[in-house]
Image: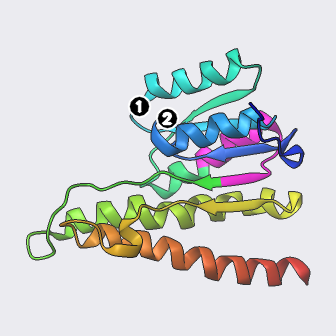
Amino acid sequence: MNTLKIPDLAGKVFLVTGASTGIGAAVAKALADQGASVAVHYHASESAAREVADSIGKAGGTAFLVAGDVTLQADCEAIVKRAADHFGTIDGLINNAGGMLGRIPIDESDEAHDRRVVDLNSHSVVWVTRAALPWLRKQRGVVINTTSIAARNGGGGGAIDPLTGGLALIFSAIAAVKLTIRRKK
């Protein structure tokens, strides 16, 4: 069986938010398989994050656990700082933390729920990216934002959740253009 190798990732450092389970865990392991060092972010799933980091270590890779609540701007800044302090740099950011906080129809939702969803799925993308920009600019790094299919098709039931995924997609497009232009100046 042939294994895909991407030599450009070897020796790079990536921060993956929401890396304790699901897509984030798979991305963290895949980056490590390519020779990248990975800051494995988690919020509530510490044991699952440890399993991801242990798996990376057993395969010969390097992982560092970093905890924090991405719904809080100060935590986003601290997550990036801890990862950068540990590795000395950040070459790439994968904004993966997010999720559905219940399929609550718009007419049954309230302000508190709306804010939790927006903070988790949209503000976190902006806040972690902003905190990582000094490193990413220095390294000519990359940002990849993940969303669920609900960002494109509306999901099932909840109204705020797909909106926030859509905002993350729009942010990706705008940031890519604006930050590339600023980098070239």
In magenta segment, residue 163:
no
The image's mark for residue 94 is: none
- Of the pair 30 and 104, the residue shown nearer to us: 30
The quarter holding residue 167 reads bottom left
Question: From the viewer's perspective, is residue 74 above or below residue 164?
Answer: above
Horizontal arrangement in the rendering, residue 23 relative to residue 64 (left or right):
left
Q: In the rendered image, which residue does mark 2 sit on?
A: 20
Q: Identify the residue shown where x is 83% and y is 40%.
A: 88
The magenta stretch spans residue 81 = yes
Which residue carries the number 1 mark?
45
Q: Count residues near mark 1 (Cα–Cα under 10 Å), then give few for <14, some for 14-19, many for 20+.
A: some
Residue 104 placement (x, y as % from top left): 15, 64
The quadrant holding residue 148 is bottom left
Q: Which residues are magenta?
A: 78-93
- Numbered disc 1: secondary structure: loop
Q: Closest to the observer: 31 or 38? A: 31
Give the left or right position of residue 19, taking residue 91 as reference: left
Q: In which quadrant is the C terminus drawn?
A: bottom right
Magenta: main secondary structure = helix
> Would you say 77 lies left or right of 103 here?
right
Q: Amino acid at mark 2?
A: Ser
- Count of numbered labels shown in the rendering: 2
- Looking at the image, can residue 163 be seen? no
Residue 111 versus residue 26: which sits nearer the camera?
Answer: 26
Spatial separation of the CA atoms under disc 1 and disc 2: 6 Å
Q: Residue furthest left?
A: 108
What amino acid does circle 1 point to? Ser
Q: Residue at x 73, y 63 (%)?
A: 133
Find residue 96 and report its horizontal and vertical position in percent: 52, 52
Within-10-Å neighbours for mark 2: few <14, some 14–19, many 20+ = many
> CB of mark 1 within 8 Å of CB of mark 2?
yes
